[in-house]
Amino acid sequence: MAGKSKLLDYEPISNPRRSNVPRDQAFEAESTRRSRADSEKTFDSDGRDGSAAPAQAVSAQPSELLKRGHTLTFAGLFLFTFLVFFRPYEFSPSLHWLSKGALITGIATLIFYIPTQLGLENRITIRTREVNLILILLVLCLLSVPFALDKFRAWGGFVEYLKVVIIFLVLVNALRTEKQLKALLFLVLTATCILSLSAIDDYRTGNFELRGQRVKGAIGNLFDNPNDLALHLVSFFPIVIGLALGARNRVARTIYFGIALTILGGTVATFSRGGFLGLVFVMGTIVWRLGKRNRTLVVIAAGFLFAAFLVLAPGAYRQRVTTMGDPSAETRKGDLKRSVYLALRNPINGVGMDNFVLYSDRELATHNSYTQVASELGLPAAAVYILFLIAAIRRLRRIPAPRELDKRQRRLPYLAIGLEASLIGYMVTSFFASVAYLWYVYYLVGYAICVSRLWETSLAIQSKDLPPSAIEAGSHGQRLVSSY
């Protein structure tokens, strides 16, 4: 086993040196009075309701829930994410050799991932509803290639999307502890802060690189376009709110809220109308999910805050978000109509992946992720894409509301609310951006699956049906659940 441990990077979650049976027994005694309510609704790895037999649903998968591993895989995933989100070779010519670093790191990560995953679970990937849907979408992408006007362009788009799907599968399987999730979130949060501060500074100094009218993202590729930059900021803003609400330390909570305000400022600096609508829905989701007991009061307070936001925002920003008849908006309307027409004209296979620009009057994208999929891959693919997003939101909604739990159990539920708002913000903002095949949402859904699995693990720790070795892991597991 020693050789296998080194080869497969496997480590059980239990840690005898941290075993603390009295503490676990005290925890069980304290939670007995609410164990029935907490365990009334549990879910299996596919996200299905397991309320009919909560104890069995949890204890049926202890090996899946209580095993740790993928240390090397996670290291590769972390480095890959750094290269994708930071693109260091753009800042210095001496780092140009890193331009192929993401591809090399991705291949190395996959080499670590496959034997480790087979050793841990004897399968290549978990089969959640989201995973099944994304695999179906990948097949539909491939099937669209023979029907494309430019088959080489379609094949290139498929290969690029295949990379996204592979990393998504690695992400949902390799993230197994809150420490790993926290590390990855902090990495992306660092890039988000850089983007936000840079956007604010560019607006302050009048450094408008996009036709001399709008700021450009400090990091290229994913964030070049101000609308794509706004989409990322909008979708990460509620995650920071979730981290802030779940933080016990007042200093940490203050820092998180300060970062959230910075991201809000960066979103305003993009002058994105889609970003503005995304923010409205993000704030509405957070208010609705957190203010259930006093929703009327909370909604009124949120209304005042929103009014204050509009008053404090620059006058040019208010003018832009209320203007829908400028040339840019008219161009987008034309592309939207064209993509809808193509989707209805080619409902089964579409016009081929990444081929819409060949049918556009101005050689532009659809500027809408839903019609992007519908026009290029067909209406069935658009339905699969939408179900993929909805499945992740439904998964997060199954985690109990923070107010129903003890304070030490609220971190994951608060983060779940933030991720739910993130996905809703993405769904709204992506209505104005062609981003269906890009990294944004696949990381968000990966985080959602990770949070769900960690919550299931916390339920398994509290289950009396687990063997003593798993109870021994309770102290360590509960420490991981409380590691924010």
Image: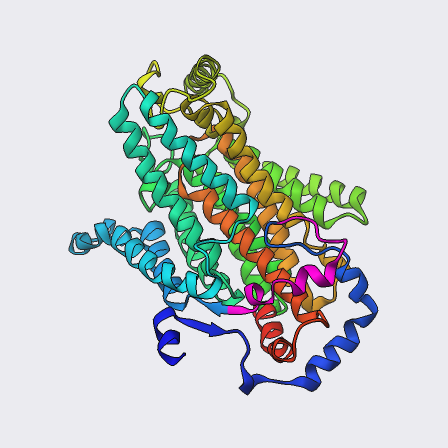
Establish if 433 lies above or below 269. Answer: above
The part of the image, by quadrant, that contains residue 212 is: top left
The part of the image, by quadrant, that contains residue 303 is: top right
Numbered marks: total: 0
Q: Is residue 278 in sight in this rendering?
A: no
Residue at the spot x=38%, y=48% of the render? 166
Q: Is residue 373 left or right of residue 39?
A: left
Q: Position of residue 367 (x, y in %)?
A: 43, 26
What's the magenta region?
47-67
Judging depth in this view, the residue of 345 and 434 nearest the camera is 345
Q: Position of residue 53 (x, y in %)?
A: 75, 57
Residue at the spot x=56%, y=33% of the render? 277
Judging depth in this view, the residue of 157 and 184 nearest the camera is 157
Establish if 407 lies above or below 188. Answer: below
Residue sticking out furthest to the right: 33
Q: Which quadrant does the C terminus fall into?
A: bottom right
Q: Position of residue 328 (x, y in %)?
A: 41, 21
Q: Which quadrant does the N terminus fall into?
A: bottom left
Q: Is residue 251 magenta?
A: no
Q: Is residue 128 left or right of residue 350?
A: right
Q: Which color mode does the image show?
A: rainbow
Q: Is residue 343 in sight in this rendering?
A: yes
Q: Position of residue 244 (x, y in %)?
A: 60, 59
